[in-house]
Every structure is written in structure tokens, then in C-alpha cells.
Image (cartoon, grey):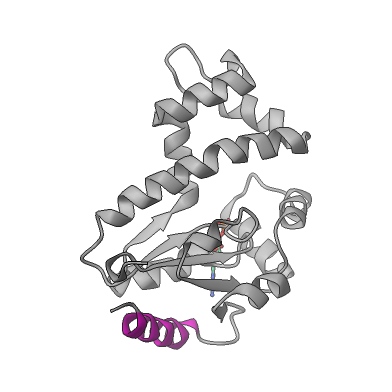
């Protein structure tokens, strides 16, 4: 891959602290692409994706003004694994294309970060040069997310975690793992990884 386009994935289970770690990288000057935020944006603004969703999920997926009917889609995929996978199969390629476009606009940066909860699960880690994994014990992750998202329950979080890879699986494939367990300091670890990435991406 062209050095100007050196791309690093950052992943981890729900509540592991990916976004928090990304903020540290941002402060160090590294551009960060948030796949989850961009996916939400694309669902409402990408005409190709919108048309594909209407074809597969029906006109109800959008209201008359073309706004995404989030609760309809969420209810449709919540209990139907096949539908959930169909939706992911539509969204992931569009996020991939959007990331490629964004990445090209960051060519002045030695490397960029792509943050995604499901980097391994979707196979998109294969298009990235290095992968950083953020890990934390499940109980701590649940505690954090319950504090952050008051509308969520412990049972919902356990159901989400059951669909994600375990920390052990991620650690085996990742190039770096940051243990965000509130016992070890993450800042020196981030700086160490950043220096290493600067060295290999130039
Ligand atoms: P998601 O997969 O849901 O997007 P995430 O992996 O991006 O989650 P964050 O949003 O970064 O996780 O962290 C979850 C919550 O835990 C946030 O409120 C964050 O501020 C808090 N948090 C993360 N790491 C720490 C830490 N080391 N000390 C204290 N709070 C933390």
C-alpha cells in the first residue's frame, strides 16, 4: 500500500474505550475516521445505499421526507439475524468506499485511524495496514456503557457482546493491544504505538 495512505484500524468491544483512545490519537494529530458515525450519516445521505435499503427492507425504511426510519429498521433487525446481516452487507461496502475517499483527502498525514467496533467480524481489517485492539474486562465495559447510555440495559449489552468477538480473539489478530482496564496507564502506551506507527508509515 502507498505510504501516504498507511491506514490503521482501531477496534474493541462495546465500552472498551475505543473512542476515548481515538481522542488521544487526535490530540497527537492523527486523523480519525469513525465508521459507526459515518455509517449513521450514510444511511441518511447516501442515495445508492438508501435505494438498496428500500429495495430490501421496503418503503417504510424512510419517511416521506427521505429521513431514515431508525426504529423500523432497528425492530426489523433486532430479532432477525438474517436481516441484520443483510443490512450489514449493504452498509459495510458503502462505509469502505466513504473511508477510501476520506483517506485520500488525508494524504498529508503519515497515517490515519479507522475506528470500528466490528473490524474483525466484518473482515474489513484485511484492507488495513495495522490493527490496534482496545480491551477491558466485560464487567467494566458494562458498567461504563450503563453510565454513558442511560437507555440501555445490562441484558441488551450482553446480547451485543455475544455478537462481537472476545478480547482473546481480537488480541490474537491485532498488532497492538491497549489494555484500558483503569489499572494500567493508557497514555504512555498510546504514545509508544504512535511513535512506532510514525516510524513504519513514513
Ligand atoms: P462503543 O463501542 O459503544 O462505541 P467505545 O469502545 O468507543 O464504545 P468509549 O465510548 O470510548 O467506548 O468509552 C465508554 C465509556 O467509558 C465512555 O463514557 C468513556 O468516557 C468511559 N471510559 C473509557 N475508558 C475509560 C477510562 N480509562 N477511565 C474512565 N472512563 C473511561
Q: Is residue 7 above or below residue 176?
A: above
Q: How many marks?
A: 0
Would you say 68 lies left or right of 160 here? Answer: left
Task: Tell which of 149 and 200 is nearer to you.
Answer: 200
Q: Main secondary structure of the magenta part?
A: helix
Task: Tell which of 198 and 115 is nearer to you.
Answer: 198
At a point 63% along the width and 59% down the height, the residue shown is 14
Is residue 9 found inside the magenta-colored segment of the image?
A: no
* Residue 115 percent across, percent down from the top left: 47, 60
* Residue 134 percent across, percent down from the top left: 57, 72
* Residue 78 percent across, percent down from the top left: 73, 36
Would you say 179 lies left or right of 81 here? Answer: left
Task: Tell which of 202 and 33 is nearer to you.
Answer: 202
Q: Is residue 36 above or below residue 28?
A: above
Task: Tell which of 127 and 72 is nearer to you.
Answer: 127
At a point 67% along the width and 77% down the height, the residue shown is 172
- Tell me the quadrant of ligand 1: bottom right
Q: Is residue 101 above or below residue 26?
A: above
Extreme-left residue of the structure: 108
Looking at the rendering, in which quadrant would you find the C terminus? bottom left
At a point 44% along the width and 60% down the height, the residue shown is 114
At a point 64% along the width and 63% down the height, the residue shown is 13
* Residue 159 percent across, percent down from the top left: 77, 51
Extreme-top residue of the structure: 64
Is residue 188 found inside the magenta-colored segment of the image?
A: yes
Looking at the rendering, in which quadrant would you find the N terminus? bottom left
The part of the chain drawn in magenta is: 186-200
Q: Quadrant of residue 191?
A: bottom left
Amino acid at each position: 500500500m502507498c505510504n501516504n495512505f498507511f491506514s490503521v484500524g482501531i477496534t474493541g468491544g462495546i465500552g472498551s474505550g475505543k473512542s476515548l483512545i481515538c481522542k488521544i490519537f487526535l490530540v497527537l494529530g492523527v486523523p480519525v475516521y469513525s465508521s459507526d458515525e459515518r455509517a449513521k450519516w450514510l444511511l441518511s445521505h447516501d442515495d445508492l445505499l438508501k435505494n438498496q435499503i428500500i429495495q430490501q427492507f421496503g418503503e417504510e425504511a424512510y419517511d416521506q421526507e427521505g429521513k431514515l426510519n431508525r426504529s423500523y429498521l432497528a425492530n426489523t433487525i433486532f430479532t432477525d439475524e438474517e436481516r441484520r446481516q443483510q443490512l450489514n452487507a449493504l452498509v459495510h461496502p458503502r462505509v469502505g468506499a466513504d473511508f477510501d475517499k476520506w483517506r485520500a483527502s488525508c494524504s498529508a498525514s503519515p497515517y490515519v485511524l479507522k475506528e470500528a467496533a466490528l473490524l474483525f467480524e466484518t473482515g474489513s481489517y484485511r484492507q488495513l495496514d495495522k490493527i490496534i485492539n482496545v480491551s477491558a474486562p466485560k464487567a467494566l465495559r458494562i458498567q461504563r456503557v450503563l453510565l454513558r447510555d442511560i437507555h440501555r440495559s445490562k441484558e441488551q449489552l450482553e446480547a451485543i457482546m455475544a455478537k462481537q468477538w472476545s478480547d482473546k480473539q481480537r488480541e490474537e489478530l491485532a498488532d497492538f493491544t491497549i489494555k484500558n482496564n483503569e489499572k494500567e496507564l493508557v497514555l504512555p502506551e498510546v504514545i509508544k504505538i504512535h511513535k512506532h506507527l510514525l516510524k513504519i508509515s513514513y
